[in-house]
Image (spheres, rainbow, N blue to C red):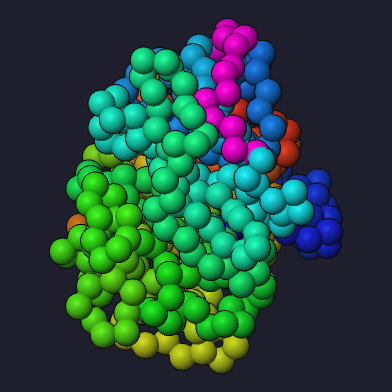
Amino acid sequence: MIRRFVVCAAAVLFAVICIQGGSGCTSAQDEDGPKTLPAVKLVEAFPELSFELPVFLTADGADDDLLYVVGQNGKIWRFKNDRDTKRKDVFLDISDRIPGDRHNEEGLLALAFHPKFKENGYFFVTYSQHDPRRGLISRFTWDKQKDKVDPDSEKIILRVDEPYGNHNGCTLMFGKDGFLYASFGDGGLAGDPKENGQDKSTLLATILRLDIDKTADGKNYAIPEDNPFKDEKGAAPEIWAYGLRNVWRMSFDREEGTLWAADVGQNAYEEVDIIEKGGNYGWNKREATHAFRNGKKTDEMIDPIVEYDRSKGISITGGYVYRGKKFDKLKGVYLYADYAMGRIWGLKYDLKDKKLVVNEQIGWSPRATISSFGEDAAGELYACGHRVNTIYRVVVKGDEED
């Protein structure tokens, strides 16, 4: 998958020691609070509900009162966006299509609703398959009259072969241009042994951009005319950006339209990137701003706007630029976290001058395992507690009652 949910026993032990303030580590809970940005905390959003291995939360764009949570084992739940709700319904169940012997990073990973979901009932998911091992982007159809989804309504949009069980992606989302964006990791193992990062002939280690409202060349999608490598010989025309090791969660800023991505590192650095059309982000020649195995940087390689090393965390979870209405102090701040260490950071970036304004730790999850952030219809932020089966609201300390 696009990030490692269970990194390894040694790494998890390292994370626990660090969170508890072990020797040689900076304790997340003992650090001074942010100096510029507001401090945030996680509050249980739906105390009466539990979700098995939640990896994503979103709204459908049609009914502002509903939320959806993706479970890694193959279920999508739908429920009312109400703190006191006690009911959740299974919106889609494809658990029988998820490999029983799946890798920790495989499963049902992403969900995106078509911009015209209310009219056509289309939504898209990414999940893992074996025999052969691959990642699928599939479309399902919600029957508005029956208010149900038939699992047999599946239409496979794209298959991406995966050589290994990790780094198999994906985030799915629609841009304001109406096209579907999808991120895929480098195919796994360690160090990118297939050297997919700098290979534009593969769909691995990339962000893709697809027109799923058209079909062409025998495929269940078409290539947008302005995709950067559409006419480059030997390059996959689906690619929007490449040289990305393992993007685990990307998002569009609702106001600015900027595409943000968090790229999980190898053994030394995690990074936050702003994705540009045709951008090369350096993997596997670079890990963040540093040479990887003596790799050389070329002029075309784009540096991250933020990186952090192993003293701060071991597996980044990308988030969102806050555009909700409840917390004025948080507006325009991009939030992200570390899955294993539980730290939550906020940053502001000057798009005009292309410079970082501030980047601070603004909170933390004492129970760690933030697998994803999510937005409701109003732009309020949530966090998925992966291993604790809980959804949290992200709130500014002092601005809302516990």
Q: Percent x, y for residue 9?
A: 83, 59
Q: Quadrant of residue 302?
A: bottom left
Range of residues picked out in magenta: 83-95
Quarter of the C terminus within the rendering: top right
Q: Percent x, y for residue 334?
A: 41, 45
Q: Can the viewer see residue 240 in this picture?
A: no
Q: Quadrant of residue 270?
A: bottom right
Classify residue 387 as left or right of residue 305. right
Q: Nearer the viewer, residue 368 or 306?
A: 368
Q: Percent x, y for residue 284?
A: 52, 80
The correct choice, above or below, for 327 with respect to 26 in the image is: above
- Look at 62% across and 65% down and name the residue there: 132
- Look at 60% across and 88% down and name the residue there: 293
Q: Percent x, y for residue 69?
A: 54, 31
Classify residue 69 as left or right of residue 369. left
- Look at 83% across and 62% down and name the residue there: 10
User: Hey, which residue is sitting farthest left in the picture?
Assistant: 225
The correct choice, above or below, for 66 with respect to 345 in the image is: above
Classify residue 119 as left or right of residue 183. left
